Amino acid sequence: MTMHREPGGERYYYTWAWFEGPDDAAWRVTGHHTDSGEQYRLDWNLAERSLCVTDSLGRTRCHWWDAQGLVTAYRDEAGQMTTFRWSDEERLLLGMTDAQGGKWRYVYDRLGHLTETHDPLGRVEQTQWHPVWHQPETEVDAAGAAWRYEYDERGNLQAVSDPLHQRTVYGYDRHGQVVRITDARGGDKYLQWNEDGQLMRHTDCSGSQTAWFYDERTRLERVTDAESNSTRYSYDGNGHLTEVMFADGRTERYQPDAAGRLVKYTSPAGQITRWQRDGQGRVRRQTDATGRRTAYEYDAYGRLTTLTNENGESYRFRYDVLDRVTEQTDPGGSRRAYGYNALNAVTAVIYGGERGGEIRHGLERDAAGRLTAKITPETCTEYRYDAADRLLEIRRRRHDAAEGGEPEVIRFSYDSAGNLLSEETAQGVLQHRYDVQGNRTETQMPDGRTLRYLYYGSGHLQQINLGRDVISEFTRDHLHREVQRSQGRLDTRRMYDRTGRLTRKLTCKGMRGVVPETFIDREYAYSGQDELLKKRHSRQGVTDYFYDTTGRITACRNEAYLDSWQYDAAANLLDRRQGETAQAGAGSVVPFNRITSYRGLHYRYDEYGRVVEKRGRNGTQHYRWDAEHRLTEVAVIRGSTVRRYGYVYDAPGRRVEKHELDAEGKPYNRTTFLWDGMRLAQECRLGRSSSLYIYSDQGSHEPLARVDRAAPGEADEVLYYHTDVNGAPEEMTDGGGNIVWEAGYQVWGNLTHEKETRPVQQNLRFQGQYLDRETGLHYNLYRFYDPDIGKFISGDPISLRGGINLYAYAQNPLSWIDPLGLTGEWVNPKDINFSQRTISPHDYAEIMRNGGWDWDRSPLRVIDIDGQLVSYDNRRLDAALEAGLDKVKVIRIDPNAPHPDSSTGKTWLQKFRERFRDRRNIKAGGIVPDKGLNSRPERTSRGCK
């Protein structure tokens, strides 16, 4: 073959030559090039058993092999060597020396099964194999935790026991397909398959059933969920999905190109989005329903070199010889540069300012790639792990600290299954307990109070208690969506339409057993685009919302509030004069997405793109930032009065204290904050009064209740939150059902009114946000949000992984949330690769098809590996593809950020690589490539999550 052409039109060319060597004689490729400009020269030296490949950039990589064709050495384009050592007869890999000099050693039994893996740190992982079925019987990690597997007489996996001796049992039909799964608490799930091995019915532990139907070509045709809502699918002659009809009759349409790649999407409301692709399928241009364009430019080797936003401003990228991004330059001229070690882990991040300034973060790593130290101009933070790579301790010290001064220390402990048992900080110790399914059942606060959680089925929250007192009880439907909760003397019902959209929240007194009295009633109506069009609130009246064709909110009208907004092409709010210019066709834009003037407010930025001054009618605010881009001090000037406030953060970046500063710069009037992971758990004011926060579910940032204590040892008072469709609190009631606080919101988060019946100072706003009344800003964990402009006041710490507009909160804050301050984006799931070859069965697709999946709470976590998105959440991605979704919400994770999962302290990149090398992947086909897998994983009873 000298040429082949892909369905997209790209042609690939090959040149050949005859080679004779000591092992064989054959035709071999000597040259390869493509229509896109890729060129490679292949230099074979069969006498030395080597091959070197050189591209048109002059980069060369080489392989050497032995007489049996096994690779013995590899030299990459940077000249770094990796060597391999093999056994003589069995041809088994005995050892590897990586490019950094780390040595790996592998031990096998007499049948060739891998029994021990020794890593460069000397840690050992062990596997004991079944003598008949040649499957693992016992797997022991480097910390000594063991997983045990049992098999039936046909070799089917019959039971799995984890390190806590919690046992899951599997039952099979005569074809070897899993038909029953009994979890560790005794709950049974049932699966039914058709003759083609496709799942037809799933019955969960609660008896709820989902059914799948297929056409004569085995394509998914219909899914009916446990509430009898059906979603239907249509295909073209090549088997490509072309239409999805939802349970309410709305239809989405997809148009693929000849290669099956999506080029046109038509929403249920008729809006069209188009993608222009090159011959290799890379998106060159995306055009939305209004004609706004985002453009992508690549070099001959597929590396993204320029990203141009809707305003025509460009981000530019440079790479090293290993295709690693070495520099990103933003439209305003600020840049990020990256340094790497031989294992491709980032060892330095340099923030270059627009005026020549520079902030350097150094990252030190051990031989296994774990982050051991982070060094900034102000601090040194050290990380310590156990043998299973779980983070045990974070120790941070300031460079200017006095000799012998105590560092900040955070400690973690875990059980043998990896569940987080405790976190010890300067604010106290949090301790946790779990049930046999890994659901957290208890959290003990530093003051001794204990939150308890009760679940049903496979982990659906049913009740929350504080000590012996019930905080709230939940009732759920067959899809396990919340339909009712208790809140003291009040009960709130939730109602949904056939596609899972929330249509009503009805709060009543006496809903249990007597004629209910309506207390608060909220009703919601939506467009075909799932946009909130109308809200009826029994206390606030009717609110209407208006949008452009791409979902940007353009106006809001109710009895207390009337406003409208205009945007530039990149979704930045325009001042009224700018908006008039844009309407006149002059194409007004906000340079670099940084708003400098809006409705009487004026903003000034430093060279790193952080707001340093905000001026308006109510005075001036000056902001000071640290080397990790965290706001540490604010000076508020009103007339001749100057008040200064300081903010303190712990090593993971959570704000743990705010205070006022006196004339000498000494702090007073302190408020301290305690965190449970990345959620605010408690605040203490002046060392006396405190508020404990309770949320609607373990993974949620929607507040459920607040428990106030006037002073240590005094009685608790429970206050309940009543939230809007986006989770923002609108009312707060006491246990007797009396309103103690209520407020109404403007679209971007400012209040139209606020009323207290007694002092309670309710500061929670959008999910994950905390109002600082001294500045009007909302603290949003990793950033501060300014509701005056609907923007963050510093760029996204995860940069373009959070979206093209580095300051954006959301184009529609009524339906989007960002509890971490790391903006999400919507991506076609077909453009995301998997990090696993196998997954365990799931029933997520039915929820996604019917609109019941909350993407704000459960987005896909992905990292960008050489331009390819790879998902950490494989079951969710698989479900999205099965559901035929054309877009999913993703959070692009910084690969070098600490992984927040309770079972590990590794960085995200380490966790991904651990997934790639998981034994289950190796057994199912080998280590997953660095860029992941495009093919959907196999569903098995022992698959990864």
Image (cartoon, rainbow, N blue to C red):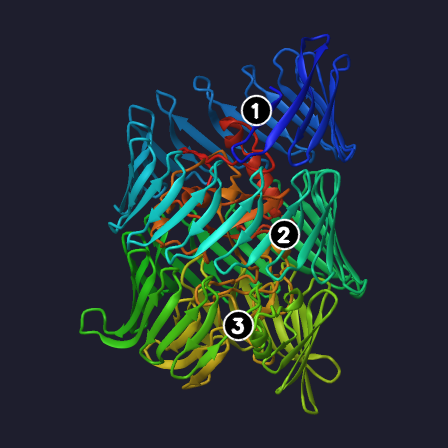
Q: Specify few, some or many for label 3: CA neighbours under 10 Å numbering under 14, 14-19, or 20 or more.
A: many
Residue drawn at the location 45% of the way across and 31% of the way down: 148
> Of residues 410 and 613, which is closer to you in this image?
613
Dot in front, 2 or 3: 3
Q: Earlier in the sequence, mark 1 or mark 3?
A: 1
Report the residue marked by disc 1. Answer: 115
Q: Identify whether 750 is placed above or below 474.
A: below
Q: Earlier in the sequence, mark 2 or mark 3?
A: 3
Report the residue marked by disc 3. Answer: 566
Describe the element under mark 1 as helix, strand or loop.
strand
Q: CA distance from mark 2 to mark 1?
A: 32 Å
Q: CA distance from mark 2 to mark 3?
A: 36 Å
Report the residue marked by disc 2. Answer: 897
Residue drawn at the location 57% of the way across and 59% of the way down: 822
Relative placement, left or right, of 697 versus 250 is: right
Residue drawn at the location 61% of the way across and 13% of the way down: 90
Dot in front, 2 or 1: 2
> Of residues 538 and 699, which is closer to you in this image?
538
Residue 773 image point, x, y percent: 56, 80
Q: Earlier in the sequence, mark 2 or mark 1?
A: 1
Q: Identify whether 822 is placed above or below 568.
A: above
